[in-house]
């Protein structure tokens, strides 16, 4: 399954919407994705499963890349 992760790069700062970044991760569950990206040292805001029409839409973006950890 593909998950879209919303995160902030700096863990010590208060999250600001304009600084939110996203990445896509292949994983079994939300817990699996969180354990994988825990090594990156980022402040995770939200993890969302992406499937169906939503996944097709995201795949059309030039920034769509699935992070393999």
Image (tube, rainbow, N blue to C red):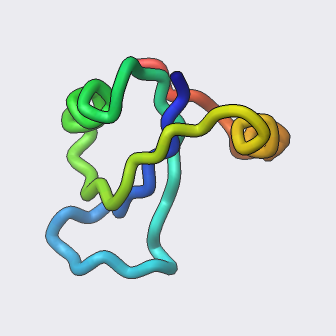
Give the residue displayed 64% in from the left and 33% down from the top.
Answer: 51
Q: In this view, does 54 lie to the left or right of 60?
A: left
Q: In this view, does 14 lie to the left or right of 46?
A: left
Vertical comparison of 19 with 64: above or below: below
Q: In this view, does 41 lie to the left or right of 15?
A: left
Give the residue displayed 21% in from the left and 37% down from the top.
Answer: 38
Q: Whole-percent x and y of residue 63?
A: 71, 45
Give the residue displayed 50% in from the left and 79% down from the top.
Answer: 18
Q: Which residue lies furthest to the right in this view?
A: 60
Q: Is residue 43 left or right of residue 65?
A: left
Vertical comparison of 31 with 47: above or below: above
Q: Whole-percent x and y of residue 62?
A: 80, 44
- Residue 10 versus residue 15: which sits nearer the camera? 15
Q: Quadrant of residue 60?
A: top right
- Residue 53 versus residue 13: which sits nearer the camera? 53
Q: In which quarter of the image is residue 55?
A: top right
Q: Whole-percent x and y of residue 22?
A: 51, 52
Vertical comparison of 32 with 63: above or below: above
Q: Which residue lies furthest to the front in this view?
A: 52
Give the residue displayed 41% in from the left and 21% down from the top.
Answer: 27
- Residue 57 versus residue 7: which sits nearer the camera? 57
Name the image quarter holding the C terminus.
top left
Q: Which residue lies furthest to the left in this view?
A: 12
In the rendered picture of this protein, how many numbered marks are placed on residues?
Answer: 0
């Amino acid at each position: 399954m593909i998950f879209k992760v919303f995160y902030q790069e700096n863990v010590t700062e208060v999250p600001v919407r304009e600084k939110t970044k996203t990445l896509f991760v292949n994983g079994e569950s939300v817990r699996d994705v969180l354990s994988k990206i825990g090594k990156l040292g980022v402040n995770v805001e939200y993890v969302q499963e992406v499937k169906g029409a939503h996944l097709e839409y995201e795949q059309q973006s030039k920034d769509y890349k699935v992070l393999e950890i």
